[in-house]
Amino acid sequence: MSAGPGAPRMEKKTFPLARVCRLLGCGPVVLVTTSREGRANVMPMAWHTMMDFTPPLIGCVIDAESLTFKTLKRTGECAINVPAAGLIEKVAGCGRTSGRDIDKFKTFGLTPLPASCVAAPLIAECWACIECRVADARMTAKYNFFVLKALAAWVTPGVKRPNTIHHLGGKTFMVAGKTVTVPSRA
């Protein structure tokens, strides 16, 4: 494949469709917490997107076989916790294990904090936390897609722009670093 007439020639090669998600990347990896009957769980999630500003709506895909999916579908609430790069080993550990088998808070040394609007705990070690309630679950049966409404948000004072973790697929992550500001007319 090459560019059209007059354009600089840039050769391309085919790329496996099953890996397209690695080309688009995602926002930061977050830790989704849920709670049911007093039992809290933590699951890393990379497939999420902002859908609206006011009220804040967040779309996310969660594996239908996971404990988090089943709990979120049943309770209708969760918390989204945003870790910085210093928690990458704990984030990866939470992704390699199941809350059906272990208490991830204890196993990975995470501190649960009470939320103000939902039963799911916040994670003290994360620099930002968002309490959410399911606003729309119509696409869960077909796409495992939830639309969450943010009810409350919390940040750690003094933390401005932490280096967040971004999943690139498989065992590969990228850590956000340099911030660039581009001037605009607005």
Image: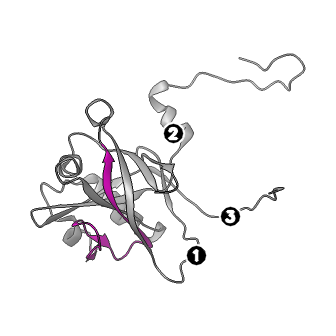
Numbered marks: total: 3
Q: Which residues are magenta?
A: 109-136
For label 2, the SS is helix
Q: How far is the residue under mark 1 from the one under mark 2?
A: 27 Å
Proximity of marks 3 and 1: CB atoms separated by less than 8 Å: no
Q: Position of residue 62 (x, y in %)?
A: 31, 44
Q: Residue at x 21, y 47 (%)?
A: 73
Q: Residue at x 58, y 75 (%)?
A: 160
98 or 53: nearer the eye?
53
Q: Nearer the viewer, mark 3 or mark 2?
A: 3
- Marked residue nearer the N-terminal end (1 or 2): 2
Tell me the crowding category of disc 1: few under 14, some 14 to 19, or many 20 or more residues within 10 angstroms, Cα based: few
Q: Residue at x 21, y 65 (%)?
A: 104
Q: Residue 119 lies in what quarter of the image?
A: bottom left
139 or 40: nearer the eye?
139
Q: Residue 41 lies in what quarter of the image?
A: bottom left
Q: Position of residue 158 (x, y in %)?
A: 54, 83
Q: Position of residue 29 (x, y in %)?
A: 43, 56
Residue bearing mark 3: 179
Q: How far is the residue under mark 3 from the one under mark 2?
A: 21 Å
